Image (spheres, rainbow, N blue to C red):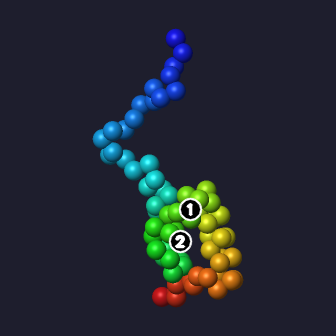
Amino acid sequence: MQRGLFDAELDIDYERDPYESVRAAGHRLATEFVIGDREAFDLVLGYGSEDAARRALVQRWWRGEVQPRAAA
């Protein structure tokens, strides 16, 4: 018998955050640039990787749209 399209097993207990690694990458970017965690999360999700989001933020820095955080 053919398996249905929506017969996948779901984690209905929500014990594991499927975006945990994306949130961590976003948080690292938010500590490098003056942006919020949510914006950084959206950038990582939108660009597909932390490195691609970082390159986009560097481009925005060159255009004067974002600032890097001061090194402590």
Q: Residue furthest top?
A: 1
Residue 4 percent coordinates (x, y): 50, 22
Q: Is residue 25 visible?
A: no
* Residue name at image x 62 percent, y 60 percent: 47
Of residues 54 and 38, the one nearer the viewer is 38
Identified at 46% across, 62% down, the residue is 24
The reply to whether discs 1 and 2 touch (Cβ–Cβ < 8 Å) is: yes
On the image, numbered disc 2 is attached to which residue? 29
Amino acid type indicated by mark 2: Leu
Q: Which residue occupies 33% across, 45% down?
A: 14
Q: Residues within 10 Å of mark 1 (few under 14, many from 20)?
A: many
Q: Quadrant of residue 49?
A: bottom right
Q: Position of residue 35 (x, y in %)?
A: 50, 77
Q: Residues within 10 Å of mark 2 (few under 14, many from 20)?
A: many
Residue 41 position within the rendered picture, expressed as x and y whole percent measured from the top left? 50, 64
Between marks 1 and 2, how big is the CA–CA gap? 9 Å
Give the SS element for disc 1.
helix
Q: Is residue 46 above or below residue 69?
A: above
Q: Residue at x 42, y 31 (%)?
A: 9
> Residue 13: percent from the left, percent from the top?
30, 41
The residue indicated by pointer 1 is 44
Label whose residue precedes the other's in the sequence (1 or 2): 2
The answer to whether residue 48 is seen in the rendering is yes
Q: Is residue 2 above or below residue 20?
A: above
Decide: is 41 above or below 10.
below
Amino acid type assigned to the residue bearing label 1 in the image: Val
The residue sitting at the left extreme is 13
Q: Is residue 8 left or right of residue 65?
A: left
**Residue 63 left/right relative to 72:** right
